[in-house]
């Protein structure tokens, strides 16, 4: 019989969504401070919140598997690359 303490997660359910929301708020503030456009800030923050929250929640709720650092670095770099490209296109079009 499995030990109950092995099945319990150290992080509560919903923590990934909260961290995704915090990341989205930071991105929202960064875009708003650069562009002074609420529509651009919201449109940049919503995808970040959804994808970051979903992936972090999945990562937190999985069993104690070894997480591949190469996949994690690839996810973070693709998210940052997309955000930088979005900012660059927006800034170029509105200057």
Image (cartoon, helix red, strand yellow):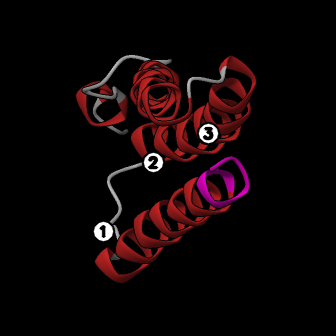
Q: CA distance from mark 1 to mark 3?
A: 19 Å
Which secondary structure type mostly characterizes the magenta part of the structure?
helix
Q: CA distance from mark 1 to mark 2?
A: 11 Å
Q: Position of residue 57 (x, y in %)?
A: 51, 35
Of helix, strand and loop, which one carries label 2? helix
Number of marks present in the image shown:
3
Question: Which residue is at the front of the view, 88 or 63?
Answer: 88
Question: Which residue is at the front of the view, 56 or 7?
Answer: 56
Q: Where is mark 2, residue-wise?
A: 59
* Of the two numbered discs 1 and 2 in the rendering, the one whose residue sits closer to the viewer: 2
Q: In the rendered structure, are the residues bearing label 1 and label 3 in contact, judged by CB atoms less than 8 Å apart?
A: no
Q: In the rendered structure, are the residues bearing label 2 and label 3 in contact, judged by CB atoms less than 8 Å apart?
A: no
Residue at the image point whose x is 64% and y is 57% from the top: 86
| Range drawn in magenta | 90-95
Q: Where is mark 1, residue-wise?
A: 66
Question: Which residue is at the front of the view, 86 or 91?
Answer: 91
Mark 2 is surrounded, within 10 Å at the Cα level, by few (under 14), some (14 to 19) or many (20 or more) other residues, namely: some
- The magenta stretch spans residue 61: no
Of helix, strand and loop, which one carries label 3? helix
Q: Earlier in the sequence, mark 1 or mark 3?
A: 3
Q: Earlier in the sequence, mark 2 or mark 3?
A: 3
Q: Is residue 41 left or right of residue 56?
A: right
Q: CA distance from mark 2 to mark 3?
A: 9 Å
Instruction: For the N terminus, give its image quadrant.
Output: top left
Residue at the image point whose x is 27% and y is 37% from the top: 6
Give the image quarter of residue 23. Answer: top left
Q: Where is mark 3, residue-wise?
A: 54
């Amino acid at each position: 019989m499995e030990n109950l303490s092995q099945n319990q997660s150290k992080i509560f359910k919903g923590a990934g969504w909260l961290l995704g929301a915090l990341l989205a708020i930071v991105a929202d503030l960064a875009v708003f401070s650069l562009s002074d456009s609420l529509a651009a800030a919201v449109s940049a923050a919503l995808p970040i919140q959804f994808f970051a929250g979903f992936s972090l929640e999945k990562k937190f709720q999985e069993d104690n598997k070894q997480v591949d650092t190469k996949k994690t670095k690839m996810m973070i770099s693709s998210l940052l690359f997309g955000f930088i490209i979005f900012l660059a296109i927006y800034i170029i079009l509105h200057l």
